[in-house]
Amino acid sequence: MMSSYTKNELNYGNLLNAITFTHNPSTIVEIGILDGYSLEKFTESTPPTTNVYAYDIFEEFNGNSGNKQELQERFKHHSRVHIEYGDFFKLHTTLPSNIDIIHIDIANNGDIYEYAVDNYMKLLSPNGCLILEGGSKERDEVTWMKKYNKTPINPLLCNYNCLTIGTVPSLTIIKM
């Protein structure tokens, strides 16, 4: 699999399993699917009544992107998994509120984090959480962040009620 969650000393898949198992969500929204690694983890550890809505811009993304048809085929046996096109910068206007978990992994940087907090936090249920890829100082130093002069994430985290786990890619959990 291409997921950066599999290339580290920390097993991010187990972490996602633990979060969903302990949270017992009824609704999960994932933005950024790539090869479906985290989507698979969400389906492994949630009750069969959990609805998982996964969105991506697929081949419109200028970088690694997932294939919508392949992903839909792969997850067709999960009747509560819905894979659709969705633009992160517009999607929040059409999503319902009271979402238990929102996972965002779309080449995250500081600007993405700020936008997510400003526009997606209000869609969470009272005990909901926002899970975002990135957040560690080491993750802010990856090649593409430097090459494209992206806004670092780590300095912004003092503004949020959050926990960052791991180094690269790292994962940040923001609670209400």
Image (cartoon, helix red, strand yellow):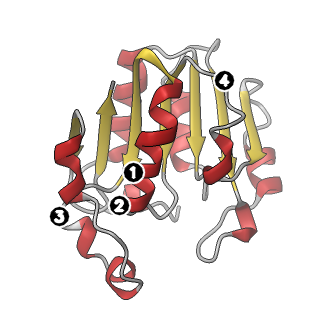
Cα separation, mark 1 vs mark 3, equals: 17 Å
Cα separation, mark 1 vs mark 4, equals: 20 Å
Disc 1 marks which amino acid? Glu
* Residue assigned mark 1: 114
Q: Are marks 2 and 1 in contact (CB under 8 Å)?
A: yes
Residue at the image point whose x is 60% and y is 58% from the top: 34
* Residue assigned mark 3: 137
Residue at the image point whose x is 64% and y is 12% from the top: 49
Disc 2 marks which amino acid? Gly
* Residue assigned mark 4: 96
Of the residues under marks 4 and 2, which one precedes in the sequence? 4
Give the foreground label among 1 and 3. Answer: 1
Cα separation, mark 2 vs mark 3, equals: 12 Å
Q: Residues within 10 Å of mark 3 (few under 14, many from 20)?
A: some
Q: Quadrant of residue 136?
A: bottom left
**Label 1: which secondary element:** helix
Of the residues under marks 1 and 3, which one precedes in the sequence? 1
Cα separation, mark 2 vs mark 1, equals: 6 Å
Q: Residues within 10 Å of mark 4 (few under 14, many from 20)?
A: few
Task: Point out which mark residue 62 bears.
Answer: none
Q: Are marks 4 and 3 in contact (CB under 8 Å)?
A: no
Give the foreground label among 2 and 3. Answer: 2
Q: Are marks 2 and 3 in contact (CB under 8 Å)?
A: no
